Image (cartoon, rainbow, N blue to C red):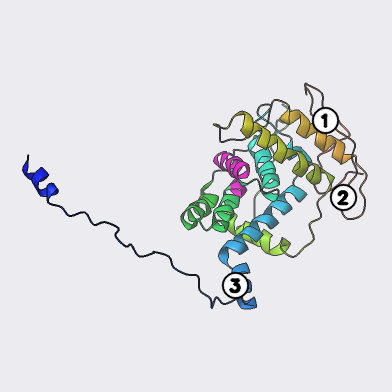
Amino acid sequence: MTYIEEMLSRALLVRERTVPRDIVPPSSHRRPASPADTKAARDSPSAEAAENLRVLCETLITHMPAASAAEFVTAQVPEPRSALVLACVLQLTETDDGARYWWQYAAGAGQPVAAYCLYLHHLALGEQDAAAWWHHQTDDVEPPPDVPARLHPTKTQPTCTWTRQEAEASATAILRTVLSLTRHTARPRPAAVTQLMSYVPLAVAAGYLRQPEIELPLPGAEFACRIRTLLASASHAPCTRGGICDHQELCPSPTCSANPATDSPAAAPSPLGRTPT
């Protein structure tokens, strides 16, 4: 027998040892939430950020051109500007994961508004470090370079000279101004927005079920075609009172070789919040 075994053999095992119950009883004097506590929770930075994000998303999808939501790199991956709009649609339908990844994609491609949406998104979740990082990125995002317009060979590029110096404003300052101007204005959701909010979350959820290992939403091979068909249908739908518009059942074709929202000469780009006359 080793020394350790000899020491263990002398150990006294306590039979039927009484262990005190480690239970903390609930307080019987819990104070009900007062109106002041409710107001404080509603006015907290997280609640204010969530409200600002909702206002910004509604403003974007109402006033951006309808064609901006129908620009796609592939049948499933939107252009950065379209990803910004579709992410706002997902946010308004409480599809946070898909919205976050499309915002990240758009911000990485030079969309500062997407970075600001991520700042508000993380601030609403109480994630202060991530929110501060995206707030800093909003002013650091490099916008995509402008493509110069092609002029006739006989024409020269017009030039102009400014007689006064323009004050520069940061992207965050501009977005804060937009929020302050639109926070208390009516933002009725038109037919195009209503249909996007009905279709996009279901398509994104189906894409995650098909490919759960991919973080970027991949809604399916017909996603771009359905979005374009949906916007074209909504642009000609008669509207009723209250901002709700009637529309026909969409029957998108298997292939989508043309963009009905932009290829038709009579269909000039119009904001999502307006119905062309």
| Amino acid type indicated by mark 1 | Pro
Q: Position of residue 40 (x, y in %)?
A: 59, 72
- Residue wearing tag 1: 260
Using the image as rendered, state which of residue 146 and residue 183 is in the foreground: 183
Q: Earlier in the sequence, mark 2 or mark 1?
A: 2
Quadrant containing the N terminus in the rendered view: top left
Q: Position of residue 211 (x, y in %)?
A: 59, 29
- Residue wearing tag 2: 244
Q: Position of residue 221 (x, y in %)?
A: 70, 25
Label 1 crowd (10 A; few <14 / some 14-19 / many >=20): some
Q: Report the side of 60 relative to 140 (left or right).
A: right
Q: Earlier in the sequence, mark 3 or mark 2?
A: 3
| Separation of marks 3 and 2 at Cα, in angstroms | 35 Å
| Separation of marks 3 and 1 at Cα, in angstroms | 49 Å
Q: Report the side of 208 relative to 93 (left or right).
A: left
Using the image as rendered, state which of residue 50 and residue 140 is in the foreground: 50
Q: Main secondary structure of the magenta part?
A: helix
The part of the chain drawn in magenta is 97-114
User: Which circle, 2 or 1, is nearer the viewer?
Assistant: 2
| Amino acid type indicated by mark 2 | Ile
Q: How many marks?
A: 3
SS label for mark 3: helix
Using the image as rendered, state which of residue 72 and residue 144 is in the foreground: 72
- Residue wearing tag 3: 40
